Amino acid sequence: RLVVGALGAVVAAPPPAQAAKASNAATSAGSRVNKDPESLLRNGLPIQGSIGGATKKLDARQLQQAIELLNDDLKVKRITAAKQDVQKAASILNAKGGAIAAAAPAAGKEAVAAELKKIGDALDALPAILADTGPAGSPQERDSLDGASAKQRAAAAAIGAVEARLVPESYTVATPSEFSAVPKLEKRARVEFVLRKAEKGATFNVDGVPYDKAKLEMIVDGYTTPLTSGNFLDLVKRGFYDGMAIQRSDGFVVQTGDPDGPDGPLVGFGQDGDAKKEPRRVPLEVFVDGDKTPTYSETTEDGMRGAAQTVLPFQAYGALGMARSEYEADSASSQFFWLLFDSDLTPAGKNLLDGRYACFGYTVKGEDFLGSVQEGDVIESAKVLSVGIDP
């Protein structure tokens, strides 16, 4: 396979596979790529029983889009456009807030109403902040934009909490009976990994600042990849990754999970926790946008849907992918990778991972550490922080 190298040269790179064989090459179709992991996670929620593109016209999604557009405009200092975004979001909230709350399951109505109020409070504060941002490049402009961004983040977090509570309490997807022994995650989970350098005294460098430890938080998604996420969560709980070394870091991915390293005979987690047994296998699990359940044991290419979009795409820095043997769809076990996504390194529409590997979540905190992680660095600890609709 071909990917574009860091200096613009076309270079060959192996795909994400067992024994630390992984690749970059991910971007989405179209010129504007949504690289925000929190936004991608919101987009992947099965709100009101629908998922992916089928939710775009729902009232909550319309409010989400207006709030996220505000973030885009603030980033590039489009103040007039940002003011219009605030007005649009407020208009949607005023017109549709009651309907959004009414769509929530009975147990979540009160919480949804509280989160909608948070959105209203954030939007109410924004006009005054954006009224006078001062001269371009001035401290006043910087302070105004910082304040506006803080309110936007609060509104974005609140709409995410709303949408999480619009998922039907009974929502689940069917999984293949032949993989009934694989643990299943029905909702979502937040997982923390803490890494240290292999060499004593060495540090992780982020923007010139040294850190003794690299702490990462990831959200893994059971709505779109219940078996992949359930297997990963089970291994974290078992302490499988504790003390394990990073086995690949090449600027495209950071990968680990091979129990005895790339040169050893083992490739995954032994059934029943016994390393001498055959690895517990996880099927390839791909949720195509427009489908109602994941596709199992088949790539979109093999299913004659090579251009199909997935609900959770590989298009955020720190996206989580399940490694497998390239020619065996159901060969995954314990090896996974963080994708070091950069939309500038691959042409739009040339994503070689979506539909071929399972994307089962995103890194939502500490992703900047990944660029400083090297082969041999050690996972000091891995633990589950929370499990639920909004972990």
Image: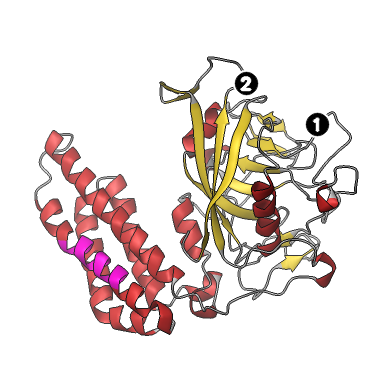
Of callouts 2 and 1, which one flags the residue occurring earlier in the amino acid sequence? 2
Range shown magenta: 114-124
CB contact under 8 Å: marks 2 and 1: no
Placement of the N terminus among the 4 image quadrants:
top right
Q: Is residue 115 magenta?
A: yes
Asked if residue 65 is positioned above or below residue 207 in the image, the reply reads below
Amino acid under disc 2: Ala
Residue 331 in view? no
- The residue at the point 36 percent across, 85 percent down is 102
Find residue 297 and report its image quarter.
bottom right
Residue 101 screen position, x and y as percent: 34, 80
Which residue, given by chain and number where applicable, does mark 1 sit on?
A: 262
Nearer to me, 277 or 368: 277
Asked if residue 370 is positioned above or below residue 36 in the image, the reply reads above
Amino acid under disc 1: Pro
Which residue, given by chain and number where applicable, does mark 2 sit on?
A: 198
Q: Is residue 309 left or right of residue 216?
A: right
Find residue 92 and report its image quarter.
bottom left
Q: Is residue 311 left or right of residue 231?
A: left
Residue 302 screen position, x and y as percent: 81, 61
Q: Is residue 17 left or right of residue 382?
A: right
Q: Is residue 169 magenta?
A: no
Nearer to me, 388 or 32: 388
